[in-house]
Image: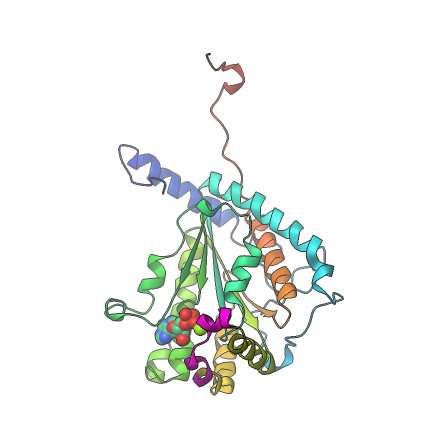
């Protein structure tokens, strides 16, 4: 990993951080088209964005998990997906070179919802050095000794990095709520605490976007069955998944609350129709590409006088 320690350049680092903060402020509503709220003119091209608009209550039951615009087959989106991946690749290289801001991508879904497949499908070809994936399981003993956000804050991206959370702090208002792991007077205030946490990240130059991969209950049944049928997929099957499936309606209610309470201008939620894996990948890829573009990362200028330098034999 790169060396970000303050040495004798400590002061420079402080100055740079302050500049980066100022840069962020100038971009803070910025992020047209992806980070601005509903009243803005539609972006171009005007495809469905699936963003949960702050102030509008989204009912999950109204979102069709089968939706795929005018596309009907995987082949229909192949070129478009390649294009979006290329945009991500190019913008990520700039973000990494610039080292002033970072992107945090949160992925949440029901079991079999496609979090892992999305990461594989969207980040193909991205420089692994500028990209981190963190998966969160049930917290261990040390994690439980801390506040619920501690383990997530530790993994938030440093400048220049794209970080993906495969599950996230939202589990603390999802599984924790549904399974009554803590009482309501503990989980209920977490929506505000999460908003404040994400606002704090945004103010330190981290753009946050969140995807809920929306599959139907019938599609989950189908995917669980295919895991059972294929010995190569047995490792993915956990009988615990069936226990969670029994709480489907409770999970939908918990997701609906999390999406609506915590979709903000600084950290929007997107509800991605995810029954069709190829359409899901397209939606996630173009949203990430648009977000990166709105962040406008630039390669830093080279030293002065490079045009006069001759490399000796
Ligand atoms: P998987 O993603 O299939 O490896 O499963 C990870 C498991 O960890 C899921 O059952 C999650 O519900 C669980 N999990 C993740 N975060 C938390 C949390 N904060 N509290 C309790 N369980 C969690
Ligand atoms: Mg699982």
Q: Residue at coordinates 41% horizontally, 78% vertically from top-left?
A: 175
Viewer-nearest residue: 209 or 278:
278
From this view, report whether residue 74 is shown above or below residue 295.
below
From this view, report whether residue 19 is shown above or below residue 189.
above
Q: Residue at coordinates 29% horizontally, 39% vertically from top-left?
A: 6
x and y percentages locating residue 266 in the rendered image: 50, 60
Tell which quarter ligand 2 is in.
bottom left
Determine if residue 180 is in view: yes
Determine if residue 264 is in view: no
* Quadrant the N terminus occupies: top left
| 272 displayed left or right of 167 | right
x and y percentages locating residue 11 in the rendered image: 30, 36
Task: State the residue lying farthest toward the top.
Answer: 313
x and y percentages locating residue 13 in the rendered image: 34, 38
Q: Residue at coordinates 44% horizontally, 42% vertically from top-left?
A: 99
Q: Residue at coordinates 65% horizontally, 65% vertically from top-left?
A: 279
Q: Is the magenta stretch mostly helix, strand or loop?
A: helix
The range drawn in magenta is 231-243
x and y percentages locating residue 77 in the rendered image: 70, 59
């Amino acid at each position: 990993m790169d060396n970000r320690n303050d040495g004798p350049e400590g002061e420079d680092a402080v100055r740079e951080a302050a500049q980066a903060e100022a840069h962020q402020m100038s971009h803070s509503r910025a992020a047209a088209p992806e980070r601005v709220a509903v009243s803005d003119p539609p972006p171009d091209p005007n495809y469905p964005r699936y963003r949960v608009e702050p102030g509008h209550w989204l009912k999950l039951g109204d979102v069709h998990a089968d939706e795929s615009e005018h596309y009907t087959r995987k082949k229909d989106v192949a070129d478009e997906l390649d294009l979006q991946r290329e945009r991500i690749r190019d913008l990520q290289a700039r973000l990494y070179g610039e080292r002033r801001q970072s992107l945090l991508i949160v992925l949440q879904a029901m079991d079999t919802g496609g979090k892992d497949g999305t990461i594989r499908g969207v980040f193909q070809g991205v420089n692994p050095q500028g990209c981190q994936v963190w998966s969160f399981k049930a917290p261990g003993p040390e994690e439980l000794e801390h506040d619920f956000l501690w383990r997530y804050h530790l993994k938030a991206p440093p400048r220049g990095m794209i970080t993906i959370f495969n599950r996230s702090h939202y589990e603390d208002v999802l599984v924790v709520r549904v399974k009554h792991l803590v009482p309501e007077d503990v989980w209920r205030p977490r929506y505000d605490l999460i908003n404040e946490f994400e606002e704090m990240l945004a103010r330190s130059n981290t753009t946050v976007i969140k995807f809920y991969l929306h599959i139907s209950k019938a599609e989950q049944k189908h995917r669980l069955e295919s895991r059972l049928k294929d010995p190569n997929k047995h490792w993915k099957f956990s009988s615990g998944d069936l226990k969670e499936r029994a709480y489907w309606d409770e999970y939908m209610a918990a997701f609906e609350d999390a999406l609506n309470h915590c979709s903000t201008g600084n950290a929007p939620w997107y509800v991605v129709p995810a029954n069709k894996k190829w359409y899901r990948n397209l939606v996630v890829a173009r949203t990430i590409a648009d977000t990166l573009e709105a962040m406008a990362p630039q390669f830093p200028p080279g030293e002065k006088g490079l045009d006069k330098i001759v490399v000796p034999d």
